Image (tube, rainbow, N blue to C red):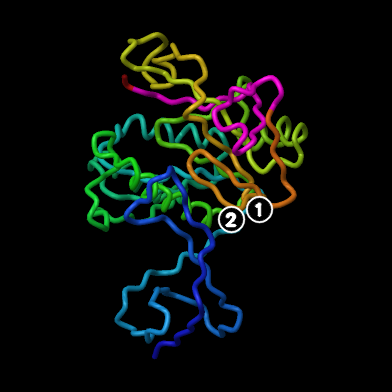
Amino acid sequence: MLSIHRSEAKIKNSYIHGSNLPELTARQYMCSTKHKTFKTVYVGLVESGMPCDPCITVKPVIYPIIKEHGTAVCAKIAFNHLNPGHLIEWFEYQKLMHVNTVLVMLQYLNDEALKVLTFYERQGFLKILPYPTVLPGQTDRGFESTNWHLEQSSHDEQVAVYTCQTYFQGYEFVAVIDFDEFIVHDKFMSYMTMLKSELLPAYPDAAAFTLNVSFFITDWGVSGVEPLLTSKYIQRTLPRFERYKNLYIPKRIQNINTHEIQPKEGYTRRCPRDDMKWKYCMQIQPRIDKKNVSIDAKTA
């Protein structure tokens, strides 16, 4: 009772990171469904020339949501242990910023943090997708700093970023940030207001906006008003150039990863004349707006 459609899979994007090749490369594949007469429910990959055996491993097809004036956050991968109180604060902050949807891929998590995620999932605010608990391949690695594999782990993380890129293609703006990061405007504007009232009028052809990052080091002690994380630790570092994050416009980008954007043809990026020390300026050509900052809460 199954209908099967077969077409050639082509590589849409292939992640390149560093000079050493990983065991497993993060890739996006694309295939045509132009002549298909039914709605696809599952998809699988087979080698060229091999038969389409219904017993092959297949994955359910996830159709993107169209929100032409929507704002989304890609939180990448939830793993290991997360503070449930800090998670609640992070989610409520995203609501204050008028975010419509948060997407995360779940690997494994402590029970208290998982309850927070499922709560926001029931609200329809969070979309949770599965991520393998045991990572494939022979390389022993994980996402914790103690188990991060220089060549392979960034490709593992990129799988989640590619997933966000596809799922949020129908939104107006998307931020790629982690659960310990907050994008803050000096006038506390929402992401949409900030982009439409300040950034896009100044840079109408921009594909994305790159934000500097300051660290709030919790080991420095309480420097503000309790009990919130964002009001308790207010002593911060000067802006750092190596951990910058992005707000991007899905219809204007070709490819993304955690820190870099590849714009589509017609959307240019220029290096600012007064800030040539930007780490990747000559490679990805960002233009910097210094009124906005992405904030990391870190423990030294």
Amino acid found under the numbered disc labelled 2: Gln
| Tag 2–tag 1 contact (CB < 8 Å) | yes
At 66% from the left edge and 26% from the top edge, which residue is drawn? 289
- Expressed as whole percent of the image width and height from the top left, the position of residue 77 reads 37, 46
Marks 2/1: CA distance? Answer: 7 Å
- Expressed as whole percent of the image width and height from the top left, the position of residue 134 reads 23, 54
Mark linked to residue 251? 1
* Label 1 secondary element: helix
Amino acid found under the numbered disc labelled 1: Lys
Tell me which corner region of the image, top left, top right, bottom left or bottom right, holds residue 219.
top left
Mark linked to residue 32? none
The mark nearer the N terminus, 2 or 1, is 2
| Residue stretch in magenta | 272-298
* Residue 135 located left or right of residue 49: left
Tell me which corner region of the image, top left, top right, bottom left or bottom right, holds residue 59.
bottom left
* Label 2 secondary element: loop
Mark linked to residue 169? 2
